[in-house]
Amino acid sequence: MRGFFKGLMAPLIGSTPYNTIVFTLNENAKTYLTARYPDMDVKTQGLIGGAGSGFLALIIYNPIELIKCRAQVNR
């Protein structure tokens, strides 16, 4: 049973910061859009919130990922 989960911890730790950023920004964007534009459709809020949060998360997280990858190559 342990063999199924061997090597799973590193990818989980690596993806946690990105997912935390995306979901936090997405929820904040949807909350802001709901307060600012109460007549906006829920699907439109999700589209704008998801696109914006994904874009900002990539801008925030990619430099961190680049540093991590370069550090692994230089070992």
Image: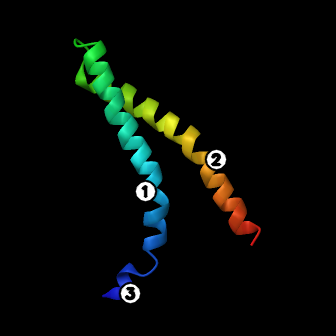
Residue 63 lies left or right of residue 13; in this view the side is right
Residue beneath disc 3: 3
Q: Name which of mark 2 and mark 3 comes first in the sequence.
A: 3
Residue sitting at x 36%, y 28%:
29
Residue sitting at x 34%, y 31%:
28
Badges 1 and 3: C-beta atoms under 8 Å apart? no
Residue 63: x and y in percent read: 64, 47
Residue sitting at x 23%, y 13%:
38
Marks 2, 3: nearer the viewer: 2
Label 3 is placed on what type of residue?
A: Gly
Q: Secondary structure under badge 2?
A: helix
Q: Name which of mark 1 and mark 2 comes first in the sequence.
A: 1
**Quarter of the image where one finds residue 8:** bottom left
Q: Quadrant of the C terminus?
A: bottom right
Would you place residue 51 above or below residue 4 in this image?
A: above
Residue beneath disc 2: 63
Badges 1 and 2: C-beta atoms under 8 Å apart? no
Residue beneath disc 1: 16
Q: Name which of mark 1 and mark 3 comes first in the sequence.
A: 3
